[in-house]
Image: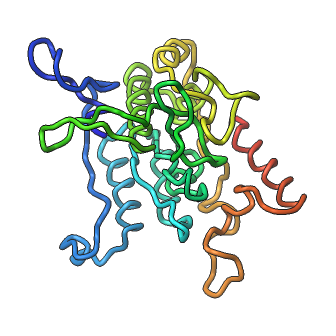
């Protein structure tokens, strides 16, 4: 993923190897996935969710301009973690762009994936070389834009090249585009950069947007050109002004399932939930 974002080739004039979207970007790697038996996990006595939240905050505090999250939980038990949500909002509040993979559950029920579903995150779905949605790419309300995610040439740490796939690769492409915009226009707010990528995307779906490809495939050159016409504005990237979406984390023994607030937005059942989803979505699209 780092190669997709910031690969700068090798050999004479960088003509060999992988050239990333933003080859002059600097990468600040932060380890946030602590598997069972990991000494760091045992030492910190932390959960995987807390490790991700801590990593996001650490990156925001140590100079990151864009945080790429080519990871996520889209299992049947996936649910929003208040600590992760707070960390994302913390990063956005500090002017950091947050990008995440939409999920690879397109052929497994399209389960909501976190951290992609947190408000303010630029969620990337995957398309093939023809711009068609990849079968594995999750289709959900939070899809912002799409990017290549099928047969992507990846430079591996073992010094070999592979053809990779996944919305993780798409997230890396979007993060590279965000890095280009941020380097040229450092004062633009994360919400402005998200809207730039959406407004300048190519091959928009019928109606302008859908859950499979968001607003279309990213066009970094068009986004950079459009950015030159913008003035920095203090837009809020989140769709709400409180610590959590709605009333906060579920209390012990609550009747609601672990999906919590995600259920109404995921489609819901009945007219009341449908109306609520529409109102919330419009709230997300309204600037300021």
- In the rendered structure, the answer to whether residue 4 lies left or right of residue 261 reads left
Please determine whether, in this image, residue 51 is positioned above or below residue 173. below
Q: Position of residue 233 (x, y in %)?
A: 59, 29
Q: Residue at x 77, y 42 (%)?
A: 282
Front residue of this view, candidates 131 and 98: 131
Q: Quadrant of the N terminus?
A: top left
- 265 relative position to 73: left or right: right
Q: Give residue 207's quadrant in the image.
A: top right
The quarter of the image holding the C terminus is: top right
Q: Nearer the viewer, residue 83 or 42?
A: 42
Residue sitting at 49 percent across and 55 percent down?
115
Q: How many marks?
A: 0
**Picture layout, residue 284 above or below residue 13:** below
The spot of residue 29 in percent (x, y) is 25, 47
Residue reaching furthest bottom?
Answer: 253
Q: Between residues 76 and 190, which one lies in front from this camera angle?
A: 76
- The residue depicted at 44 percent of the width and 23 percent of the height is 181
Where residue 41 appears, x then y in whole percent? Answer: 26, 73
In the image, residue 102 lies at what x, y percent? 52, 47
Question: Outermost residue, right direction?
Answer: 271
């Amino acid at each position: 993923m780092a190669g997709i974002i910031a690969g700068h080739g090798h050999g004479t004039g960088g003509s060999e190897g992988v050239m990333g979207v933003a080859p002059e970007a600097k990468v600040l790697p932060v380890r946030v996935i602590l598997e069972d038996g990991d000494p760091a996990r045992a030492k910190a006595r932390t959960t995987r969710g807390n490790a991700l939240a801590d990593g996001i905050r650490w990156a925001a505090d140590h100079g990151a301009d864009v945080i790429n999250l080519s990871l996520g939980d889209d299992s049947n038990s996936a649910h929003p973690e208040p600590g992760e949500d707070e960390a994302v909002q913390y990063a956005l509040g500090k002017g950091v762009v947050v990008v995440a993979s939409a999920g690879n559950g397109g052929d497994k029920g399209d389960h909501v994936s976190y951290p992609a579903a947190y408000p303010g995150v630029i969620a990337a779905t995957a398309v093939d070389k023809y711009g068609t949605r990849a079968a594995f790419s999750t289709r959900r309300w939070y899809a912002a834009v799409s990017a290549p995610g099928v047969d992507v040439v990846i430079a591996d740490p073992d010094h070999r090249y592979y053809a990779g796939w996944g919305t993780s690769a798409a997230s890396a492409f979007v993060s590279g585009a965000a890095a280009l915009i941020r380097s040229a226009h450092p004062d633009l707010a994360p919400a402005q950069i998200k809207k730039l990528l959406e407004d300048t995307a190519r091959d928009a779906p019928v109606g302008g947007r859908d859950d499979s490809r968001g607003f279309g495939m990213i066009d970094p050159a068009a986004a950079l050109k459009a950015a030159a016409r913008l003035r920095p504005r203090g837009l809020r990237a989140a769709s709400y002004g409180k610590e959590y979406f709605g009333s906060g984390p579920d209390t012990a023994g609550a009747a609601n399932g672990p999906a919590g607030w995600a259920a109404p937005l995921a489609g819901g059942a009945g007219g009341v939930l449908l109306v609520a989803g529409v109102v919330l979505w419009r709230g997300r699209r309204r600037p300021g």
